[in-house]
Image (cartoon, rainbow, N blue to C red):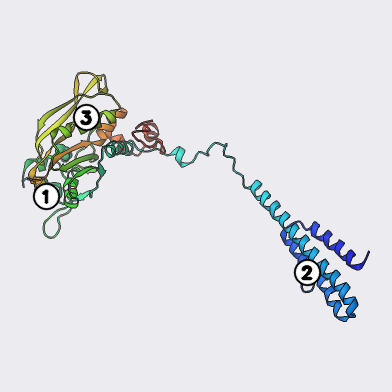
Amino acid sequence: MTDIEQLEASILDDIHAAADEAALESVRVATLGKQGSVSALLKTLGAMSPDERRTRGAAINALKDRVGLAIADRKAVLKDAALDARLARETVDITLPVRPGPLAEGRIHPVSQVIDEITAIFTDMGFSVAEGPDIETDHYNFTALNFPPDHPAREMHDTFFLKPKQDGSRLLLRTHTSPVQVRTMEREKPPIRIIAPGRTYRCDSDATHTPMFHQVEGLVIDETTHFGHLKWVLEEFLKAFFEVDEVKTRFRPSFFPFTEPSMEVDVGCKRSGSEIRIGEGDDWLEILGCGMVHPNVIRSAGLDPDRYQGFAFGMGIDRIAMLKYGMPDLRAFFDADVRWLRHYGFRPLDLPSLYGGLTS
Ligand code: DAH
C-alpha cells in the first residue's frame, strides 16, 4: 500500500465514523483544511523534481477530490438522518383526545348567549349591530326621544343620576337602549337597519327586576317602511328565537313618547304550572314594546320626517332568556355563582347561528 492509499483508507474510515455534521466538519478540517493531512502532502511537492512532481501531484490532487466527494456524500446522509430523527421526535398524535382546558371548563353566560342568538337572527335579516354609551345625557335618554320636560314618563324610568356638573346638568345611566336610535340616525344616512343590545339601569330590584338589566333596541328607517314590515320582522324573530314553526302575536295600543302609534306586543303561549310554552295554547305573554318612530324623534336626530319614516322596538333580553331557558330568578343572573353558571351556561365553542342551530 502506498502512503497515499494508506492515508486515504484512514481518512475514509474517519469520514464514515463521523456520527454527526460537527464530527464530519472536524474530519474535513483535519484533512483538507490549511493544516490538514492532504494539504500537508501537497506542500511536499515544492521540494520534488519536475517529473516526480507531475506524477505525485496528479495522485495527491485525485486524493483531494475523492476525499472532498466522500465528505459531501457523508454530509448528505447525516443531514437526512438528522431530519428523520427530528420528524420522529416532533410527531403529534392527533388521535389523542384534546386536553380539558379553559375551553372545556368555562361557560358562556345565558345573557351573552341570548345576545348572540338575537344578533344571529337579525343580522340574517340584514340588520347590523349599533352601540351607544351606558352613561348618557338627559338629551339622548329623554329629550331627543320626545319626552317633554317634567313629563311623568321620566319619573317612570327610576333614573340613576350622576352628581350634577357645575352648569347644573346631570349625566345619567341610560334607562333604556332607545338613545342609540338617536345616535345612529345622527351618524348614518338612511336606509338604517340596526339592533342595539346592551346594558340598561333603573332603580328597581325584586325577583324580576335588577338595577342593571339588558335590552335590545331595533330601528329601521327609510322612506317606505311601514307597520306591516314591523309585524313581519317581529314574528320572524319570535319564531327563530323560540325555535317554533308558528307564533301568534297580539298588538295592543300603548304609549311611548318616541313612537306614534305605540304598541305592546303579546305572544301566544301555554302555561302549565310555572312552565310557559311559546307557540302553543291560548294564553298571552307581553314580550316587547314597539311603534312607528315619532316624527319629532326623526327631526331631533337631524333627519327630515317628511321624507323618512320607520319603526322601532325595545325588548328585555334577560326576560326572554328566562323564558327560553326556564331560569326562574333574574337576580341569579348577576350573582356570579359558578354552580349556577355551570348549570345554565353554554359551551364556548357552540356559537349560535341560523344554519348550525341557535342552541345545538
Ligand atoms: N324604551 C322602552 C322601555 O324601555 C322600550 C321601547 C318601547 C323601545 C317601544 C322602543 C319602542 O323602541 O318603540 O320601556
Q: Is residue 280 above or below residue 68?
A: above
Disc 2 under 8 Å from ligand 1? The reply is no
Q: Nearer the viewer, residue 190 or 138?
A: 190
Using residue 261 as the reference point, say whether residue 274 is left or right of it.
right
Residue under numbered circle 3: 235
Disc 2 and disc 3: Cα gap in Å? Answer: 87 Å
Question: Residue at point 79% right, 74% down?
Answer: 35
Pointer 3 local density, CA inside 10 Å: few below 14, some 14–19, many at least 20? some
Using residue 164 as the reference point, say whether residue 24 is left or right of it.
right
Residue under numbered circle 2: 32
Question: Disc 1 residue type?
Answer: Leu
2 or 3: mark nearer the eye: 2
Residue at disc 1, secondary structure: loop
Q: Position of residue 205 (x, y in %)?
A: 22, 37
Disc 1 and disc 3: Cα gap in Å? Answer: 28 Å
Quarter of the view holding residue 343: top left
1 or 2: mark nearer the eye: 2
Pointer 2 local density, CA inside 10 Å: few below 14, some 14–19, many at least 20? some
If you read the primary sequence from the N terminus, does the residue marked by circle 2 or circle 3 appear first?
Answer: 2
Pointer 1 local density, CA inside 10 Å: few below 14, some 14–19, many at least 20? some
Residue under numbered circle 1: 303
Q: Nearer the viewer, residue 57 or 250?
A: 57
Residue at disc 3, secondary structure: helix
Question: Disc 3 residue type?
Answer: Glu
Whether residue 262 is visible, yes or no, is yes
Q: Are marks 1 and 3 in contact (CB under 8 Å)?
A: no
